[in-house]
Every structure is written in structure tokens, then in C-alpha cells.
Image (cartoon, helix red, strand yellow):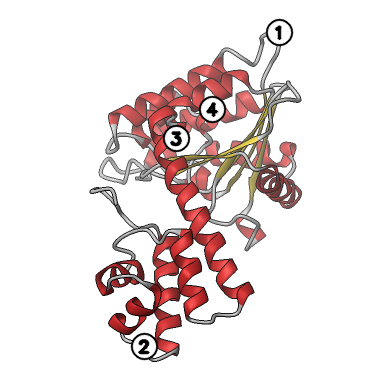
């Protein structure tokens, strides 16, 4: 067992299942260990997920406990998957950091669909807005966001322009990020960029109520080569993740389509953004008012 072993939630669930099998048969750790040929210490560590449960050991316990075959086979499959996930996670951590790599995908993509709940999508942010968002965050992550924005900035008028479709909540327009002046500049930038032929900006008005993917922002990237699958990008302040399973990316695409259908159309969205930018409170806000959404 690796010295730095930390059980995943799946491995902990497997351990609980092993303990439940033993409890159902009213066996002590010692009695169960003798039957299967394990020490009571090893069995205890498996049940408490202090060490991984090897698929062959799960199989042995299922056989000794006389668990119905489909039931123990299902747990063996979970143990096999847990082992693969552990190896894959370690390998991915060594070879690829999605947050660091994301700008490269933006540069290679043919279409970017972004759904956000609290902030203007990264590719549509002004530098001042991005700086305000990241003011209290990791400076490395801040630099990465700037790189993503710059990757798109080279694309609108190029030979292979990147199509951007953005949907976000109306609350994004009312959240004063970076202070009144910076926020008004951001709204004016949205108005300007939304008129570009390769950009679609849609706003979900407050009247929409509940909507698909509520509270779950994501970015979906399409690529020009058929050998390259769509990729969904998810990010929190803790970590970033690529989702490449076609079934899951299709779910993202379906939700994005539903969001577009619920949102105001681009023309109506532009009018709402213009109304927000023209509101007099941008200039009348007190100096000590909140300046970021962080």
C-alpha cells in the first residue's frame, strides 16, 4: 500500500459494503478473517478504506460470505474501476493540468459555448474586469484567465474565426465587479462584441425562474477535426477538469440548447445590456460600495 494512500469516496463505499456483508452474517473480524485467510487487521483496513480493496480480495469475501453472485460481481467491478481511477488520476496529474492547458484548446477550437451564472464569460471579459475578479485569488490562475482571453482575442477576425455563443444570468449585469467605472466599461464591451457576426450573447432574465444547469457553469468546445471530440471544461477555485466522454458532452450540449431557448434572443439581450449600462446608479454609487463579486 502506498504511504500517501487516501481513499476515494468510491473506495470508502466499497469498504462499507464489505463491512455490511460481514455484519449481516454476524461474524467478528477474527472469524471472517480466518474463513477467508486474511488477518483481522487487513480486513479491518479494507472495511475502513485504510487500504485499497483489491478486486480479488473482494471476490474472495463475496465467495466466503455466500453473497449472491451478481451482488459481489458488482462490487468487484467497482473495485476495478476505483483502481483505474486512482492510476488515471495520478497519470493525469503528472501529464496535464486542464487549467493551464485550456487556452490552447480555445485557440484550436472552432466553436465555444459558455454558460456562466455569476460572471461574464472569460473570453468576453475586459482586462479590468478579469483583474477585479482575480484580485483576491491565485495570481497564477489570474494569469491563466488573461491567457484564455488573449487566445480568443486573436480569433474574431482571423481566417478561422472562433464562434462564441454565451448565455449568462441577468444577475451578471447587476454585479459590480471592479467598481462602477470598470463594470460600465465591461457592459459597453459586451454591447460592442455582441454585434460581431461570430458572437452570440444571450441573457437569462430574472423572470425565467429555474433553468437547466442552474448553479453549474460550464464551457463546451467544438473542434474542426472529426478525430477530435467535443470537450467540456469545468472549473472551480479548487481545480479544473476536462470532460471528454461523448455521452456527457452531449448532455452539456443539450442543456446549452435549452438555455438558449429560455434566454432572451440576442437582440433583446443587447437591449437589456444597454439598459443596464445606461442606468444612472453607475455614476452615483458611493465610493465604499462593493467593488467585486468575489
Q: In front: mark 3 or mark 2?
A: 2
Disc nearer the start of the sequence (1/2):
2
Disc nearer the start of the sequence (2/4):
2
| Front residue of this view, candidates 203 and 253 | 253
Real-space CA distance between mark 4 and mark 1, rounded to the nearest whole angstrom: 19 Å
Real-space CA distance between mark 3 and mark 2, rounded to the nearest whole angstrom: 41 Å
Disc nearer the start of the sequence (1/3):
3
Residue position marked by numbered label 4 in the rendering: 123
Q: In front: mark 4 or mark 3?
A: 3
Real-space CA distance between mark 1 and mark 3, rounded to the nearest whole angstrom: 33 Å
**Rendering quarter of residue 27:** bottom left
Residue position marked by numbered label 3 in the rendering: 92
Q: Are marks 3 and 2 in contact (CB under 8 Å)?
A: no
Residue 20, given in percent of the width and then of the height, sits at 43, 81
Disc nearer the start of the sequence (3/2):
2
Disc nearer the start of the sequence (4/1):
4
Residue position marked by numbered label 1 in the rendering: 159
Amino acid at each position: 500500500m502506498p504511504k500517501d494512500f487516501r481513499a476515494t469516496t468510491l473506495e470508502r463505499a466499497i469498504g462499507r459494503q464489505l463491512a455490511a456483508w460481514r455484519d449481516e452474517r454476524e461474524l467478528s473480524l477474527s472469524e471472517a478473517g480466518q474463513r477467508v485467510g486474511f488477518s483481522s487487521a487487513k480486513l479491518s483496513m479494507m472495511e475502513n478504506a485504510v487500504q485499497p480493496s483489491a478486486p480479488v480480495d473482494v471476490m474472495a469475501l463475496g465467495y466466503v460470505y455466500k453473497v449472491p453472485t451478481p451482488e459481489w460481481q458488482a462490487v468487484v467491478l467497482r473495485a476495478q474501476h476505483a483502481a483505474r481511477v486512482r492510476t488515471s488520476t495520478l497519470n493525469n496529474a503528472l501529464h496535464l493540468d486542464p487549467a493551464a492547458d485550456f487556452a490552447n484548446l480555445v485557440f484550436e477550437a472552432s466553436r465555444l459555448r459558455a454558460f456562466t451564472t455569476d460572471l461574464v464569460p472569460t473570453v468576453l471579459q475586459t482586462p479590468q474586469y478579469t483583474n477585479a475578479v482575480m484580485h483576491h485569488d491565485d495570481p497564477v490562475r489570474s494569469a491563466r484567465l488573461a491567457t484564455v482571453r488573449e487566445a480568443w482575442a486573436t480569433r474574431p477576425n482571423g481566417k478561422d474565426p472562433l464562434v462564441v455563443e454565451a448565455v449568462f444570468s441577468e444577475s451578471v449585469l447587476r454585479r459590480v465587479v471592479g467598481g462602477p467605472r470598470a463594470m460600465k466599461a465591461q457592459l459597453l464591451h459586451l454591447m460592442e462584441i455582441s454585434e460581431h457576426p461570430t458572437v452570440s450573447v444571450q441573457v437569462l432574465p430574472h423572470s425565467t425562474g429555474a433553468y437547466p444547469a442552474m448553479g453549474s457553469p460550464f464551457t463546451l468546445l467544438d473542434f474542426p477535426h472529426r478525430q477530435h471530440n467535443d470537450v467540456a471544461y469545468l472549473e472551480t477555485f479548487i481545480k479544473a477538469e476536462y470532460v471528454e466522454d461523448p455521452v456527457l458532452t452531449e448532455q452539456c450540449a443539450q442543456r446549452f440548447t435549452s438555455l438558449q431557448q429560455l434566454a432572451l434572443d440576442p437582440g433583446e439581450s443587447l437591449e437589456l445590456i444597454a439598459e443596464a449600462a445606461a442606468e444612472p446608479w453607475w455614476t452615483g454609487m458611493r465610493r465604499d460600495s462593493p467593488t467585486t463579486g468575489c
